[in-house]
Image: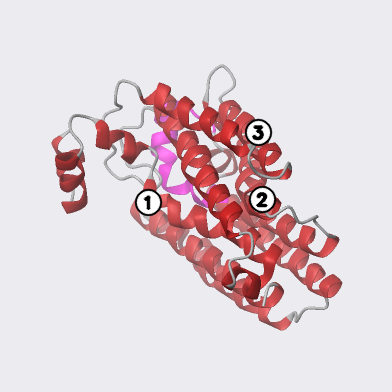
């Protein structure tokens, strides 16, 4: 308990500023993930309006509204409700040494999810539809008796579509612009890209998941096969991006950079995984997230400039 509250200066300040367990509610919606989620969400907005349009503030009000609803209400609410039913004791994604669950965390997470859905109707139709789909998937993913996060394969499908494709699509939809084939292929490419990333997020939690009895995708596949699947998924994603470049008459050569970034992470991981500790697997996950960020930047340079 004391470690959770005093782990570093930011937590100490947080618990001083917010009395009781209030800061624990903030920690359990995992703001450390918000920059990653926000960046991937905004990718769809910039693809829709272009870099120049974004610089000029085109549809910026809708984009910012969508960003808050998607990142804080939907994603934050999903992570909080996940904490309620997981009851992790060790480190979890974007939250090391999680504090004990505050009493009303379930109510808080539901309020975020429902409130975000109601407010989503202020945006063009595609956005509340995407939000509703992910809202339902969040409940199915975390809450018994469904708890699909414990069903290997189903958890994978939910995440590859929810985070991979629907997240950037949500910001695209907020602008009201119709989706064409070329840009649809770009958004689709992030589905297999996340299919590659997702098992990597589970490799450092093997012992925790075994203890809880969750049969995650990575546990079913094993570490080596998980890494092979990740490499194959990345290759498929890059192929879809190449197809999109052909449709949109965009340059293909720069797309070699994210492919190289991913392979620089995954190939050494595949070769050395048997000797790695959980901490090394966790560092590998964060390096993969860096490769994801490189992919986002290159996609914008190729397709939105």
Q: Which residue is mark 2?
A: 174
Residue 13, position in %: x, y?
16, 47
Q: Calculate the distance from the C-alpha at mark 3 to the C-alpha at mark 2.
A: 14 Å
Q: Calculate the distance from the C-alpha at mark 3 to the C-alpha at mark 1.
A: 24 Å
Q: Toward which corner of the image does residue 258 lie, by quadrant? A: bottom right
Q: Calculate the distance from the C-alpha at mark 1 to the C-alpha at mark 2.
A: 24 Å
Q: Which residue is mark 3?
A: 132
Identify which residue is drawn at 52% across, 60% down: 39
Q: Nearer the viewer, residue 233 or 165?
A: 165
Identify which residue is drawn at 59% across, 21% down: 146
Q: Is residue 279 positioned above or below 16 on the image? A: below
Residue 198, position in %: x, y?
56, 49
38 sits to left or right of 52: left
Q: Main secondary structure of the magenta part?
A: helix
Q: Toward which corner of the image does residue 120 lie, by quadrant? A: top right
Q: Which residue is mark 1?
A: 32
Magenta residue span = 198-215
Residue 26, position in %: x, y?
33, 39
**Does the stretch in magenta take in 213?**
yes
Crowd class of label 1 (few under 14; some 14 to 19; many from 20; radius 10 Å): few
Judged by depth in the image, the label closer to the viewer, 3 or 1, is 3
CB atoms of marks 3 and 2 within 8 Å: no
User: In the rendered image, is residue 152 in sight?
Assistant: no
Q: Toward which corner of the image does residue 244 lie, by quadrant? A: bottom right
User: In the rendered image, is residue 167 in sight?
Assistant: yes
């Amino acid at each position: 308990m004391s470690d959770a509250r005093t782990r570093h200066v930011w937590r100490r300040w947080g618990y001083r500023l917010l009395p009781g367990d209030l800061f624990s509610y903030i920690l359990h919606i995992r703001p450390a993930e918000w920059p990653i989620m926000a960046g991937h969400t905004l990718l769809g907005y910039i693809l829709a309006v272009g870099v120049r349009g974004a610089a000029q503030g085109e549809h910026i009000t809708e984009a910012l509204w969508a960003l808050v609803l998607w990142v804080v209400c939907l994603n934050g609410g999903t992570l909080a409700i996940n904490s309620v039913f997981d009851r992790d004791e060790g480190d979890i994604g974007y939250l090391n040494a999680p504090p004990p669950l505050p009493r009303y965390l379930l109510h808080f997470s539901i309020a975020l999810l429902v409130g975000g859905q109601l407010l989503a109707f202020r945006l063009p139709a595609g956005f509340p539809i995407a939000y509703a789909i992910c809202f339902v998937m969040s409940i199915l993913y975390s809450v018994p008796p469904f708890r699909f996060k414990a069903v290997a394969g189903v958890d994978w499908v939910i995440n590859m579509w929810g985070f991979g494709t629907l997240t950037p699509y949500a910001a695209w939809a907020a602008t009201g612009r119709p989706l064409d084939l070329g840009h649809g292929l770009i958004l689709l490419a992030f589905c297999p890209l996340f299919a590659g990333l997702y098992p990597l997020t589970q490799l450092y939690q093997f012992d925790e998941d075994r203890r809880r009895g969750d049969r995650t995708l990575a546990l079913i596949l094993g570490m080596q096969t998980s890494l092979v699947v990740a490499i194959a998924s990345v290759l498929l994603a890059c192929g879809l991006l190449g197809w999109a470049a052909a449709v949109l008459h965009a340059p293909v050569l720069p797309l070699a950079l994210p492919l190289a970034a991913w392979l620089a992470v995954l190939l050494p991981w595949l070769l050395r995984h048997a000797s790695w500790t959980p901490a090394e697997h966790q560092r590998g996950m964060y390096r993969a997230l860096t490769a994801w960020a490189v992919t986002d930047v290159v996609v914008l340079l190729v397709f939105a400039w």
